[in-house]
Image: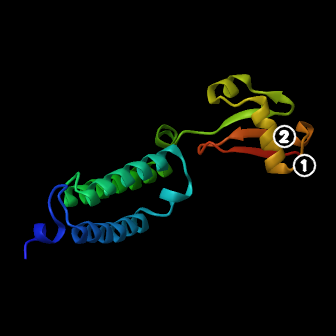
């Protein structure tokens, strides 16, 4: 039996071929996530989200037959490998990390708003007030030492000691 008979070719797939592709792709994706590391779904930075979006799009194309099955598998494997390499380089070299993952920005410190960083990140004073309420369960900026927007887009609040 030929591999094309088993997995089909193109978009004209039988239900069984479609299901077999989905079954294989599920375990392939799981294996790649395990090999790539939990960071892929853990940090939720733009760096990680790009991989997740592209990985999902390519895997679906491989399942549906819009892209040849093994070409989709190869492309996703390459993306996970590139993600892993860039993650390793980011860990070793801070400049690579800043380029690939971005960096945090201080938005508030000791009673002073950093208007420049607030404008760059499109964070309003109302957004900072919300973060204070959510993060430290307070409505008073007097309780806050610093506020940052992190690489993953989350606003973090450091409470005064």
Question: Above or below — where is 114 with respect to 22?
Answer: above
Which class describes the residues within 10 Å of circle 2: few (<14), some (14-19), or many (20+)? Answer: some
Name the residue that disc number 1 marks. 161
Mark 2–mark 1 CB contact (< 8 Å): yes
Q: Which of the 4 image quarters holds residue 116?
A: top right
- The quadrant of the rendering that contains the N terminus is bottom left
Name, please, the residue furthest toward the bottom.
1
Name, please, the residue furthest toward the left.
1
Name the residue that disc number 2 marks. 145
Callout 1: helix, strand or loop? loop
Of 58 and 21, the residue lying toward us: 21
Q: Is residue 93 visible?
A: no
Of 81 and 32, the residue lying toward us: 32
Count of marks overlaid on the render: 2
Q: Residue at x 30, y 58 (%)?
A: 77
**Residue 53, image x, y percentages:** 42, 49
């Amino acid at each position: 039996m030929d591999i094309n008979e088993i997995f089909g070719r193109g978009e004209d797939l039988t239900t069984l071929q479609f299901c077999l592709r989905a079954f294989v792709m599920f375990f392939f994706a799981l294996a790649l996530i395990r090999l790539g590391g939990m960071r892929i779904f853990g940090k939720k930075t733009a760096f990680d989200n790009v991989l997740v979006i592209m990985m999902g799009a390519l895997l679906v194309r491989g399942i549906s037959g819009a892209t040849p099955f093994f070409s989709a598998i190869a492309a996703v494997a390459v993306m996970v490998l590139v993600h892993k390499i860039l993650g390793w380089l980011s860990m070793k070299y801070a400049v690579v990390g800043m380029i690939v993952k971005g960096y945090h920005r201080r938005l508030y410190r000791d009673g002073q708003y950093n208007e420049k960083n607030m404008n760059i990140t499109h964070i309003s004073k109302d957004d900072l007030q919300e973060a204070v309420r959510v993060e430290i369960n307070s409505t008073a900026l007097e309780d806050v030492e610093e506020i940052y927007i992190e690489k993953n887009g989350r606003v973090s609040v450091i409470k005064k000691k």
